[in-house]
Amino acid sequence: MLKELIRNTRSIRRFKQEPAPSMADLESLIELARLAPAASNKQPLKYVLVRDPDLLPQVFDCLKWAGYLTDWPGPAPEERPTAYIVFLNDTAISGGASVHLIDLGLAAQNIVLGAREMGFGACLLGSVDRPRLAEILGVPEGLRIELVAALGAPGEEVRLTASGKDGDIRYWRGEDDVHYVPKRPLSELIVKKL
């Protein structure tokens, strides 16, 4: 069951507008993130939950989508996320350092797996205009934006495929409008069996 959930949890970049995650859905995803392990158990991650229809387009304008799809400007207005979770680093807790990448990854994975289990899709975005987004959201001093999760009902099909013979791992959108994501084979990942 977990293996199937992981296999079916892909980055979604086009969304349906209904159903949209409720604030209770977003809070339950933060509960999953809260339960993730954290380096030295410091737990410096905090979150801004966004569903406000006036803020959604403003958040969207601070994000860059799908670097490998150079001819695609991102989701059309009717395909945009219906919610966002903005990951913040409380620098008073982290001592001013960046959030440990393991902490960020574990919390993010819990959120995207939880979203998928609820029937939603997610896309984690690190290419963010952080100063502008912090201003739009009124992020208090001492909290630094680390990552944004875009959420909503999946509006596209995403399929896994093998990486190219040349090792090419760039995702692409086919003529069938399916988003293909190449994955390296297991034989390339295991260096030794001792």
Image: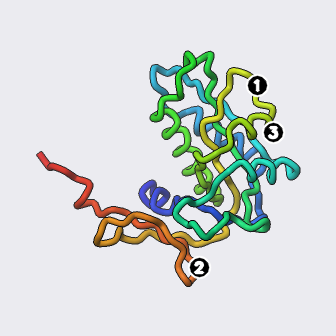
Residue named by callout 3? 136
Question: Nearer the observer, disc 2 or disc 3?
Answer: 3
Which residue is drawn at the image coordinates 55% and 83% (left, top)? 175
Residue 16 percent coordinates (x, y): 73, 67
Q: Residues within 10 Å of mark 2 (few under 14, many from 20)?
A: few
Q: Are marks 3 and 1 in contact (CB under 8 Å)?
A: no
Residue named by callout 2? 177
Q: Amino acid at mark 3?
A: Ile
SS for callout 2 = loop
Q: CA distance from mark 2 to mark 3?
A: 34 Å
> Closer to the camera, 138 or 1?
138
> Closer to the camera, 131 or 117?
131
Residue 189 percent coordinates (x, y): 26, 54
Which residue is drawn at the image coordinates 63% and 62% (left, top)? 13
Q: Are marks 2 and 3 in contact (CB under 8 Å)?
A: no
Residue named by callout 1? 140
